[in-house]
Amino acid sequence: MSTQPSISLDHISKIYKLYDKPTDRLKEAILPFGRKFHKDFHAIRDVSFSIAPNETVGIIGKNGSGKSTLLKMITGVLTPTSGNMKVNGSISALLELGAGFNAEYTGLENIYLNGTISGFSRAQMDEKLDNILSFADIGDFIHQPVKIYSSGMFVRLAFAVAINVEPDILIVDEALSVGDMRFQQKCFRKIEEMKQSKTVLFVSHDMATITNYCDRAIWINEGELLEDGLPSELAKRYQAFMMGSRITKSSIAATTNKEATPAIAQDDIDAIPANLDVLGDNKARITGITMLDAVTNEKTALFYPAQAVRVIIKVAANEQIENPIIGLSIKDRLGNIVAECNSETSYSEVAELDVEQTASYSFSFDLPHLNKGTYTISPAIASGTLEEHTQHSWVHDAFVFQVLSNRKNALQGLLVLDHVEFNQIQ
Protein backbone atom coordinates (compact mmCIF):
# COMPACT_ATOMS: atom_id res chain seq x y z
CA MET A 1 0.00 0.00 0.00
CA SER A 2 1.27 3.48 -0.85
CA THR A 3 2.29 5.66 2.06
CA GLN A 4 1.58 8.79 0.04
CA PRO A 5 -1.66 10.62 0.93
CA SER A 6 -4.46 10.15 -1.57
CA ILE A 7 -5.28 13.85 -1.26
CA SER A 8 -3.04 16.56 0.16
CA LEU A 9 -4.00 20.25 0.45
CA ASP A 10 -1.42 22.78 1.58
CA HIS A 11 -2.73 26.29 2.35
CA ILE A 12 -5.31 26.20 -0.46
CA SER A 13 -7.34 29.35 -1.15
CA LYS A 14 -9.95 30.20 -3.76
CA ILE A 15 -10.77 33.88 -4.28
CA TYR A 16 -13.48 35.28 -6.52
CA LYS A 17 -13.66 38.90 -7.68
CA LEU A 18 -17.07 40.44 -7.03
CA TYR A 19 -18.11 43.55 -8.98
CA ASP A 20 -21.02 45.82 -8.12
CA LYS A 21 -21.71 46.59 -11.80
CA PRO A 22 -20.73 44.87 -15.07
CA THR A 23 -18.96 48.04 -16.21
CA ASP A 24 -16.62 47.90 -13.20
CA ARG A 25 -14.98 44.82 -14.70
CA LEU A 26 -14.23 46.74 -17.89
CA LYS A 27 -12.98 49.80 -15.96
CA GLU A 28 -10.58 47.68 -13.96
CA ALA A 29 -9.21 46.14 -17.16
CA ILE A 30 -8.55 49.40 -19.06
CA LEU A 31 -7.79 52.03 -16.41
CA PRO A 32 -4.11 52.59 -15.51
CA PHE A 33 -2.33 52.31 -12.15
CA GLY A 34 -4.05 49.03 -11.24
CA ARG A 35 -7.13 50.64 -9.72
CA LYS A 36 -9.46 48.03 -8.18
CA PHE A 37 -13.21 48.02 -8.71
CA HIS A 38 -13.86 44.65 -7.13
CA LYS A 39 -14.10 43.06 -3.71
CA ASP A 40 -12.36 39.80 -2.96
CA PHE A 41 -14.58 36.94 -1.84
CA HIS A 42 -12.71 34.08 -0.16
CA ALA A 43 -14.72 30.96 -1.01
CA ILE A 44 -11.87 28.92 0.53
CA ARG A 45 -9.29 30.49 2.81
CA ASP A 46 -5.95 28.85 3.66
CA VAL A 47 -7.21 25.27 4.07
CA SER A 48 -4.75 22.44 4.74
CA PHE A 49 -5.37 18.73 5.33
CA SER A 50 -4.41 15.34 3.94
CA ILE A 51 -6.39 12.15 3.44
CA ALA A 52 -4.70 8.77 3.65
CA PRO A 53 -5.33 5.90 1.21
CA ASN A 54 -8.47 3.87 2.05
CA GLU A 55 -9.66 6.56 4.48
CA THR A 56 -13.30 7.67 4.46
CA VAL A 57 -13.74 11.35 5.27
CA GLY A 58 -16.92 13.40 5.56
CA ILE A 59 -17.03 17.14 4.98
CA ILE A 60 -19.67 19.03 6.93
CA GLY A 61 -20.71 22.67 7.03
CA LYS A 62 -23.72 24.89 6.48
CA ASN A 63 -24.88 25.81 2.98
CA GLY A 64 -22.51 28.28 1.35
CA SER A 65 -19.57 27.38 3.56
CA GLY A 66 -17.33 26.34 0.65
CA LYS A 67 -17.67 22.54 0.72
CA SER A 68 -18.59 22.16 -2.95
CA THR A 69 -15.90 24.62 -4.01
CA LEU A 70 -13.36 22.54 -2.13
CA LEU A 71 -14.48 19.33 -3.85
CA LYS A 72 -14.41 20.99 -7.26
CA MET A 73 -10.78 21.99 -6.71
CA ILE A 74 -9.89 18.45 -5.63
CA THR A 75 -11.55 17.03 -8.76
CA GLY A 76 -9.86 19.61 -10.99
CA VAL A 77 -13.03 21.42 -12.03
CA LEU A 78 -11.71 24.59 -10.37
CA THR A 79 -8.14 25.85 -9.98
CA PRO A 80 -6.99 27.16 -6.58
CA THR A 81 -6.02 30.81 -6.40
CA SER A 82 -3.08 29.94 -4.15
CA GLY A 83 -1.61 26.97 -2.34
CA ASN A 84 -0.48 23.50 -3.38
CA MET A 85 -2.59 20.41 -3.93
CA LYS A 86 -1.67 16.83 -4.78
CA VAL A 87 -4.03 14.00 -5.73
CA ASN A 88 -2.62 10.49 -6.06
CA GLY A 89 -4.93 8.23 -8.00
CA SER A 90 -7.90 8.42 -10.32
CA ILE A 91 -11.03 10.24 -9.16
CA SER A 92 -14.68 9.48 -9.78
CA ALA A 93 -17.02 12.18 -8.54
CA LEU A 94 -20.72 12.83 -8.10
CA LEU A 95 -20.98 16.57 -7.68
CA GLU A 96 -24.18 18.49 -8.37
CA LEU A 97 -26.72 16.66 -10.51
CA GLY A 98 -25.90 17.08 -14.18
CA ALA A 99 -22.14 17.41 -13.83
CA GLY A 100 -20.36 15.37 -16.47
CA PHE A 101 -23.54 14.39 -18.33
CA ASN A 102 -24.90 15.74 -21.61
CA ALA A 103 -28.62 16.37 -21.17
CA GLU A 104 -29.33 15.65 -24.85
CA TYR A 105 -27.59 12.27 -24.82
CA THR A 106 -29.32 9.10 -23.75
CA GLY A 107 -28.32 7.39 -20.53
CA LEU A 108 -26.41 4.79 -22.55
CA GLU A 109 -24.52 7.44 -24.52
CA ASN A 110 -23.64 9.21 -21.29
CA ILE A 111 -22.18 5.98 -19.88
CA TYR A 112 -19.74 5.81 -22.78
CA LEU A 113 -19.09 9.57 -22.58
CA ASN A 114 -18.12 9.29 -18.91
CA GLY A 115 -16.01 6.25 -19.66
CA THR A 116 -14.09 8.18 -22.28
CA ILE A 117 -13.55 11.07 -19.86
CA SER A 118 -12.20 8.56 -17.33
CA GLY A 119 -9.75 7.15 -19.91
CA PHE A 120 -11.56 3.93 -20.85
CA SER A 121 -12.02 2.65 -24.39
CA ARG A 122 -15.41 1.67 -25.74
CA ALA A 123 -14.44 -1.99 -25.51
CA GLN A 124 -13.57 -1.55 -21.83
CA MET A 125 -16.88 0.18 -21.15
CA ASP A 126 -18.68 -2.67 -22.96
CA GLU A 127 -17.29 -5.00 -20.28
CA LYS A 128 -18.58 -2.75 -17.49
CA LEU A 129 -21.97 -2.06 -19.04
CA ASP A 130 -23.90 -4.96 -17.49
CA ASN A 131 -22.75 -4.02 -13.98
CA ILE A 132 -23.68 -0.37 -14.54
CA LEU A 133 -27.13 -1.19 -15.90
CA SER A 134 -27.79 -3.71 -13.13
CA PHE A 135 -26.85 -1.26 -10.37
CA ALA A 136 -28.72 1.71 -11.90
CA ASP A 137 -31.84 -0.41 -12.54
CA ILE A 138 -33.68 2.22 -14.60
CA GLY A 139 -34.94 -0.18 -17.27
CA ASP A 140 -35.69 1.13 -20.76
CA PHE A 141 -35.08 4.72 -19.66
CA ILE A 142 -31.41 3.99 -20.37
CA HIS A 143 -32.27 4.64 -24.04
CA GLN A 144 -33.96 8.00 -23.34
CA PRO A 145 -32.28 11.44 -23.09
CA VAL A 146 -31.26 12.16 -19.51
CA LYS A 147 -33.01 15.54 -19.69
CA ILE A 148 -36.29 13.69 -19.06
CA TYR A 149 -34.93 11.77 -16.06
CA SER A 150 -36.18 12.42 -12.56
CA SER A 151 -33.51 13.40 -10.04
CA GLY A 152 -33.74 9.92 -8.53
CA MET A 153 -33.20 8.20 -11.89
CA PHE A 154 -30.32 10.51 -12.68
CA VAL A 155 -28.46 9.79 -9.46
CA ARG A 156 -28.99 6.06 -9.95
CA LEU A 157 -27.19 6.22 -13.28
CA ALA A 158 -24.52 8.66 -12.10
CA PHE A 159 -23.63 6.60 -9.03
CA ALA A 160 -23.60 3.35 -11.02
CA VAL A 161 -21.13 4.87 -13.49
CA ALA A 162 -19.00 6.44 -10.76
CA ILE A 163 -18.39 3.19 -8.88
CA ASN A 164 -17.75 1.10 -12.00
CA VAL A 165 -14.99 3.19 -13.58
CA GLU A 166 -12.60 1.74 -10.99
CA PRO A 167 -11.65 4.95 -9.17
CA ASP A 168 -8.96 5.15 -6.52
CA ILE A 169 -10.91 8.02 -4.96
CA LEU A 170 -14.72 8.31 -4.85
CA ILE A 171 -16.16 11.76 -4.15
CA VAL A 172 -19.87 12.28 -3.47
CA ASP A 173 -21.39 15.72 -2.90
CA GLU A 174 -24.84 15.30 -1.28
CA ALA A 175 -26.10 13.57 -4.44
CA LEU A 176 -27.40 10.49 -2.65
CA SER A 177 -29.94 12.54 -0.69
CA VAL A 178 -32.29 12.57 -3.72
CA GLY A 179 -32.49 8.79 -4.15
CA ASP A 180 -35.21 6.60 -2.68
CA MET A 181 -34.47 4.83 0.61
CA ARG A 182 -33.77 1.41 -0.90
CA PHE A 183 -31.34 2.86 -3.41
CA GLN A 184 -29.60 4.94 -0.73
CA GLN A 185 -29.08 1.80 1.34
CA LYS A 186 -27.77 0.02 -1.75
CA CYS A 187 -25.31 2.87 -2.35
CA PHE A 188 -24.08 2.90 1.24
CA ARG A 189 -23.58 -0.87 1.16
CA LYS A 190 -21.40 -0.29 -1.89
CA ILE A 191 -19.53 2.53 -0.15
CA GLU A 192 -18.96 0.23 2.84
CA GLU A 193 -17.50 -2.33 0.45
CA MET A 194 -15.33 0.25 -1.32
CA LYS A 195 -13.93 1.55 1.98
CA GLN A 196 -11.73 -1.55 2.17
CA SER A 197 -9.71 -0.53 -0.87
CA LYS A 198 -10.67 3.01 -1.90
CA THR A 199 -10.49 6.53 -0.54
CA VAL A 200 -13.99 7.96 -0.07
CA LEU A 201 -14.75 11.64 0.43
CA PHE A 202 -18.30 12.91 0.68
CA VAL A 203 -20.39 15.84 1.79
CA SER A 204 -23.55 15.33 3.80
CA HIS A 205 -25.80 17.28 6.15
CA ASP A 206 -26.89 13.98 7.69
CA MET A 207 -24.81 13.56 10.84
CA ALA A 208 -25.88 9.93 11.19
CA THR A 209 -24.32 9.22 7.79
CA ILE A 210 -21.12 10.99 8.80
CA THR A 211 -20.79 9.10 12.09
CA ASN A 212 -21.78 5.76 10.53
CA TYR A 213 -19.49 5.68 7.53
CA CYS A 214 -16.61 8.10 8.11
CA ASP A 215 -13.28 7.62 9.83
CA ARG A 216 -12.85 11.42 10.06
CA ALA A 217 -14.90 14.55 9.63
CA ILE A 218 -13.75 17.94 8.39
CA TRP A 219 -15.83 20.99 9.28
CA ILE A 220 -15.70 23.90 6.84
CA ASN A 221 -17.27 27.23 7.79
CA GLU A 222 -17.13 30.49 5.82
CA GLY A 223 -14.38 28.99 3.69
CA GLU A 224 -12.14 28.09 6.61
CA LEU A 225 -11.30 24.74 8.18
CA LEU A 226 -12.95 24.97 11.58
CA GLU A 227 -12.25 21.47 12.92
CA ASP A 228 -10.83 18.12 11.82
CA GLY A 229 -11.48 15.12 14.05
CA LEU A 230 -13.69 12.25 15.13
CA PRO A 231 -17.13 12.29 13.46
CA SER A 232 -18.99 11.61 16.73
CA GLU A 233 -17.39 14.63 18.43
CA LEU A 234 -17.73 17.02 15.50
CA ALA A 235 -21.36 15.98 14.97
CA LYS A 236 -22.30 17.22 18.45
CA ARG A 237 -20.52 20.55 18.04
CA TYR A 238 -21.89 21.05 14.54
CA GLN A 239 -25.41 20.32 15.80
CA ALA A 240 -24.98 22.96 18.50
CA PHE A 241 -23.62 25.45 15.95
CA MET A 242 -26.55 24.94 13.58
CA MET A 243 -28.99 25.51 16.46
CA GLY A 244 -27.34 28.86 17.22
CA SER A 245 -25.80 27.56 20.42
CA ARG A 246 -22.40 26.29 21.41
CA ILE A 247 -20.88 23.37 23.23
CA THR A 248 -19.62 23.97 26.76
CA LYS A 249 -18.46 21.58 29.45
CA SER A 250 -20.54 20.59 32.44
CA SER A 251 -18.98 21.80 35.67
CA ILE A 252 -20.84 19.57 38.11
CA ALA A 253 -18.54 17.14 39.88
CA ALA A 254 -19.17 13.46 39.36
CA THR A 255 -20.57 11.47 42.28
CA THR A 256 -20.36 7.81 43.08
CA ASN A 257 -23.48 5.72 42.67
CA LYS A 258 -25.41 5.16 45.87
CA GLU A 259 -26.89 1.83 46.86
CA ALA A 260 -30.16 1.08 45.13
CA THR A 261 -33.20 1.83 47.28
CA PRO A 262 -36.85 0.86 46.94
CA ALA A 263 -37.82 4.48 46.28
CA ILE A 264 -35.95 7.34 44.63
CA ALA A 265 -35.36 10.62 46.46
CA GLN A 266 -33.86 13.90 45.23
CA ASP A 267 -30.50 13.07 46.80
CA ASP A 268 -30.47 9.65 45.13
CA ILE A 269 -30.45 11.11 41.60
CA ASP A 270 -26.93 10.73 40.26
CA ALA A 271 -25.17 13.96 39.40
CA ILE A 272 -24.17 14.67 35.81
CA PRO A 273 -20.52 13.62 35.32
CA ALA A 274 -17.98 16.36 34.73
CA ASN A 275 -16.65 17.28 31.28
CA LEU A 276 -19.66 16.20 29.25
CA ASP A 277 -20.65 18.24 26.20
CA VAL A 278 -23.56 20.59 26.97
CA LEU A 279 -25.59 22.55 24.45
CA GLY A 280 -27.69 25.56 25.51
CA ASP A 281 -27.76 29.06 27.00
CA ASN A 282 -27.45 27.82 30.64
CA LYS A 283 -30.57 29.62 31.88
CA ALA A 284 -31.46 26.22 33.30
CA ARG A 285 -29.17 23.26 33.85
CA ILE A 286 -29.55 19.50 33.82
CA THR A 287 -27.90 18.56 37.12
CA GLY A 288 -28.77 14.89 37.48
CA ILE A 289 -30.10 11.79 35.75
CA THR A 290 -30.92 8.28 36.96
CA MET A 291 -32.40 5.24 35.26
CA LEU A 292 -34.46 2.65 37.14
CA ASP A 293 -36.18 -0.67 36.67
CA ALA A 294 -39.82 0.46 36.67
CA VAL A 295 -40.97 -2.71 38.45
CA THR A 296 -38.46 -2.87 41.32
CA ASN A 297 -37.73 0.89 41.37
CA GLU A 298 -34.03 0.06 41.68
CA LYS A 299 -31.32 2.06 39.99
CA THR A 300 -29.48 0.10 37.32
CA ALA A 301 -27.65 0.45 34.01
CA LEU A 302 -28.41 -3.05 32.71
CA PHE A 303 -31.66 -3.71 30.87
CA TYR A 304 -33.32 -6.14 28.49
CA PRO A 305 -35.19 -5.26 25.29
CA ALA A 306 -38.74 -3.99 25.93
CA GLN A 307 -38.12 -3.72 29.68
CA ALA A 308 -40.20 -1.16 31.61
CA VAL A 309 -37.92 1.66 32.79
CA ARG A 310 -38.05 5.05 34.46
CA VAL A 311 -35.70 7.92 33.70
CA ILE A 312 -35.53 10.72 36.25
CA ILE A 313 -34.04 14.07 35.25
CA LYS A 314 -33.08 16.75 37.75
CA VAL A 315 -33.07 20.41 36.71
CA ALA A 316 -31.86 23.63 38.34
CA ALA A 317 -33.11 27.00 37.05
CA ASN A 318 -30.70 29.95 36.95
CA GLU A 319 -33.46 32.24 35.67
CA GLN A 320 -37.24 32.10 35.57
CA ILE A 321 -38.27 29.56 32.93
CA GLU A 322 -41.76 29.83 31.44
CA ASN A 323 -43.28 26.94 29.51
CA PRO A 324 -40.44 24.52 30.20
CA ILE A 325 -40.07 21.45 27.99
CA ILE A 326 -38.27 18.42 29.44
CA GLY A 327 -37.04 15.74 27.06
CA LEU A 328 -34.54 13.01 26.34
CA SER A 329 -32.90 11.22 23.43
CA ILE A 330 -31.71 7.62 23.35
CA LYS A 331 -28.66 7.15 21.11
CA ASP A 332 -26.66 4.16 19.96
CA ARG A 333 -22.88 3.89 20.23
CA LEU A 334 -22.42 5.76 16.93
CA GLY A 335 -24.50 8.70 18.08
CA ASN A 336 -27.57 7.87 16.01
CA ILE A 337 -30.79 8.87 17.73
CA VAL A 338 -32.84 5.72 18.35
CA ALA A 339 -35.82 7.42 20.00
CA GLU A 340 -36.87 10.70 21.59
CA CYS A 341 -39.62 11.89 23.91
CA ASN A 342 -40.49 15.07 25.77
CA SER A 343 -43.18 16.59 27.92
CA GLU A 344 -44.79 18.38 24.96
CA THR A 345 -45.29 15.25 22.88
CA SER A 346 -46.62 13.55 26.01
CA TYR A 347 -49.24 16.34 26.28
CA SER A 348 -48.05 17.16 29.80
CA GLU A 349 -48.10 20.65 31.23
CA VAL A 350 -44.98 21.61 33.15
CA ALA A 351 -45.13 24.38 35.75
CA GLU A 352 -42.81 27.32 35.26
CA LEU A 353 -39.55 27.30 37.19
CA ASP A 354 -38.51 30.12 39.49
CA VAL A 355 -34.96 31.44 39.83
CA GLU A 356 -32.76 28.93 41.72
CA GLN A 357 -35.59 26.39 41.84
CA THR A 358 -34.69 22.71 41.57
CA ALA A 359 -37.15 20.18 40.19
CA SER A 360 -37.14 16.56 39.09
CA TYR A 361 -39.14 14.93 36.31
CA SER A 362 -39.84 11.30 35.51
CA PHE A 363 -40.34 9.50 32.17
CA SER A 364 -41.76 5.98 32.33
CA PHE A 365 -41.80 3.82 29.22
CA ASP A 366 -40.90 0.45 27.76
CA LEU A 367 -37.50 0.36 26.11
CA PRO A 368 -37.60 -0.22 22.37
CA HIS A 369 -36.75 -3.77 21.30
CA LEU A 370 -33.07 -2.86 21.12
CA ASN A 371 -30.41 -5.34 20.25
CA LYS A 372 -27.64 -5.96 22.76
CA GLY A 373 -25.09 -3.17 23.03
CA THR A 374 -24.23 0.15 24.64
CA TYR A 375 -26.63 3.09 24.50
CA THR A 376 -26.75 6.57 26.02
CA ILE A 377 -29.42 9.00 27.20
CA SER A 378 -29.11 12.72 26.50
CA PRO A 379 -31.51 14.75 28.72
CA ALA A 380 -32.59 18.28 27.85
CA ILE A 381 -34.57 21.27 29.05
CA ALA A 382 -35.90 23.97 26.74
CA SER A 383 -38.72 26.50 26.88
CA GLY A 384 -41.40 27.63 24.45
CA THR A 385 -43.06 25.28 22.00
CA LEU A 386 -41.87 22.40 19.84
CA GLU A 387 -41.97 24.69 16.81
CA GLU A 388 -40.26 27.65 18.48
CA HIS A 389 -38.18 26.91 21.54
CA THR A 390 -34.95 27.95 23.23
CA GLN A 391 -32.53 25.26 24.29
CA HIS A 392 -31.25 25.82 27.83
CA SER A 393 -29.37 22.62 28.52
CA TRP A 394 -28.90 19.50 26.43
CA VAL A 395 -26.33 17.15 27.95
CA HIS A 396 -24.90 14.75 25.40
CA ASP A 397 -24.57 11.13 26.57
CA ALA A 398 -25.24 11.90 30.24
CA PHE A 399 -26.19 8.34 31.13
CA VAL A 400 -24.69 5.16 29.69
CA PHE A 401 -26.58 1.89 29.85
CA GLN A 402 -26.27 -1.63 28.47
CA VAL A 403 -28.93 -3.68 26.76
CA LEU A 404 -28.43 -7.41 27.31
CA SER A 405 -29.58 -10.19 25.04
CA ASN A 406 -32.40 -12.40 26.28
CA ARG A 407 -32.16 -14.66 23.26
CA LYS A 408 -30.20 -17.84 22.75
CA ASN A 409 -29.04 -16.76 19.30
CA ALA A 410 -28.33 -13.05 18.74
CA LEU A 411 -28.63 -11.55 15.29
CA GLN A 412 -27.34 -8.27 13.93
CA GLY A 413 -29.27 -5.02 13.64
CA LEU A 414 -30.30 -2.13 15.85
CA LEU A 415 -33.71 -3.58 16.78
CA VAL A 416 -34.94 -7.04 17.71
CA LEU A 417 -37.97 -8.42 15.89
CA ASP A 418 -40.32 -9.95 18.44
CA HIS A 419 -43.37 -12.17 18.02
CA VAL A 420 -42.21 -13.36 14.62
CA GLU A 421 -44.27 -16.20 13.21
CA PHE A 422 -42.66 -18.49 10.67
CA ASN A 423 -44.57 -21.02 8.62
CA GLN A 424 -43.91 -23.11 5.60
CA ILE A 425 -46.50 -22.48 2.93
CA GLN A 426 -47.74 -25.65 1.26
Image: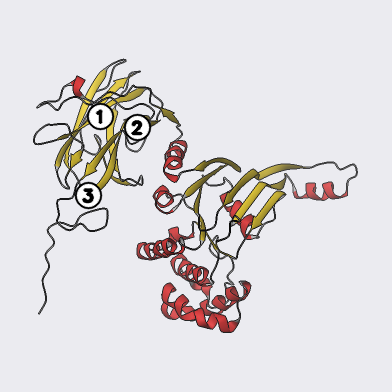
Q: Residue 144, can we see it? A: no
Label disc, if present, on residue 395 of the rendered structure = 2
Please tell me in which quadrant of the rendered image residue 186 appears.
bottom left
Q: CA distance from mark 3 to mark 1?
A: 21 Å
Kind of residue at disc 1: Ile
Q: Dot 1: within a 10 Å radius of its alpha carbon, few (fewer than 14), some, or many (20 or more) residues?
A: many
Q: Give the residue pinned by disc 3.
A: 370
The quarter in which the N terminus is drawn is bottom right
User: Which numbered circle lies on residue 289?
Assistant: 1
Q: Colour mode?
A: secondary structure
Is residue 402 visible in the rendered structure shown here?
A: yes
Residue 7, quarter of the rendered image? bottom right
CA separation in Å, label 1 and label 2 = 10 Å
57 in relation to 94, above or below: above
Nearer to the camera, 304 or 280: 304
Query: Which numbered tag is attached to residue 90?
Result: none
